[in-house]
Image (spheres, rainbow, N blue to C red):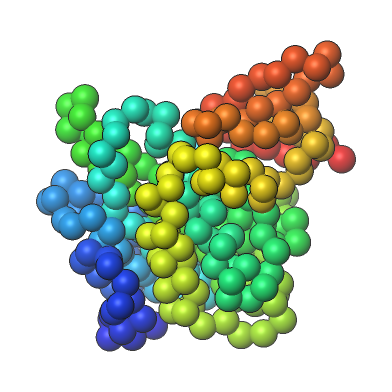
Amino acid sequence: MNATALNSALQDLPVGEVHYFASIGSTNDFAAERIQAGASPFSVVVADEQTRGRGRGGRGWFTPPGAALAFSMLFYPQEQPAERLALFGGLGALAVARAFEELYRLPAAIKWPNDVLLGDAKTCGVLAEAHWEGSRLKGVVLGIGVNVTPGSVPPDTALQFPATCVEAALGRRVDRLALLRAVVAALLAEYPRLGGAGFLRDWQARLAFRDRRVQIIDAGVAVQEGTIAGLMPDGRLQLRDSSGQLHRIGAGELHLRPLE
Ligand code: BTN
C-alpha cells in the first residue's frame, strides 16, 4: 500500500481529501483534526499501521503493518439529533458487510451494535465519533478496522469474542485496496439512506444472533438478558425478556454476548 496506489484505487469515487500514512497513531485522531480544519466531506484517512489504534470502550485496536485495513472517513450530517450518531456505527458495519458480500460472496452478519462477523467471528470493528462546536455537531469521524491477513488478528481476543480475518474466511489472498474501494463505495451509496426504512431493513436483515438469547454487557458486567427482537429506527436494539416485555438498549459502550 502507498499513496499513489491509494489515490488510484479511489480516483473515480466522489471522496474529499485522501491522506495516506505508512504509520500513524490513530486515523480517527488525524480525521478529527481534519474536521476541526473544515476538510471536505467524505475525506478519507488511511494507514498501513496504527501505533495507537483505538477501539470501542477505551480499548486499543491492533493494526500491525501490512496486515489490516484501517481508515477513517469524515461526514457532516445536516440533521443534528444525537441519536443519529448511533446510526453511523450501523452505516460502517453495513458498508463492510456489503463489500464482503459483493467482492467475495461471503455472507456477513452484524453483531449489534456494529461488529462485522464472518462465520460467527469478529472480522471488523467500527468506531463512530462525534465532534462538537459548543452544542452544534460539527462532524462525525467514522473509523473502520478490518482484519485482512492472519497477522492482523490480535492474539488475545479469543477470550472476549472469537476473531478471524478475511483471508482465513475466504481461503485466499485479499487485495486491501480493492476492499477499501468497495467499502468506501458502499459508504457513499448507503449514506443518503442513513436511518431510512431501507437502511434499517438491510441492517436488521444481517443482525447476528437474531431470535437468540443474549446478554448485554456494560463494562464487563451483564446488565440485561433476553432474545434479540430487532432494531429501533434510531439503531437501538430491541430485546425481549423472559416475561415477553420489550427493552430498548442504546449502543453507548455496550456490547452483546450470545448465551447459546
Ligand atoms: C471496535 O472496538 O470494534 C472498533 C474498532 C475501530 C478500529 C478503527 S481502525 C481505523 C480507526 N482508527 C482507530 O483508531 N480506530 C478505528
On the rendered structure, is 247 left or right of 178? right
**Residue at the farthest right position:** 260
Q: Where does the image place residue 222, in percent across and percent down from the top left?
A: 70, 26
Residue at horizontal 32%, vertical 39%?
A: 130
Quarter residue 259 falls in? top right
Quarter residue 209 falls in? top right
Q: Nearer the viewer, residue 227 or 2?
A: 227
Residue at horizontal 25%, vertical 39%?
A: 78
Q: Where does the image place residue 3, in percent across and percent down from the top left?
A: 28, 81
Q: Nearer the viewer, residue 211 or 36?
A: 211
| Residue 111 visible, this angle | no
Q: Quadrant of the N terminus?
A: bottom left
Q: Quadrant of the C terminus?
A: top right
Give above or below for 200 relative to 106.
Answer: above
On the rendered structure, is 51 left or right of 75? right
Residue at horizontal 61%, vertical 85%?
A: 173
Residue at horizontal 40%, vertical 65%?
A: 184
| Residue 42 visible, this angle | yes
Q: Nearer the viewer, residue 228 or 215?
A: 228
Q: Where does the image place residue 227, in percent across and percent down from the top left?
A: 78, 30
Give above or below for 14 relative to 41.
Answer: below
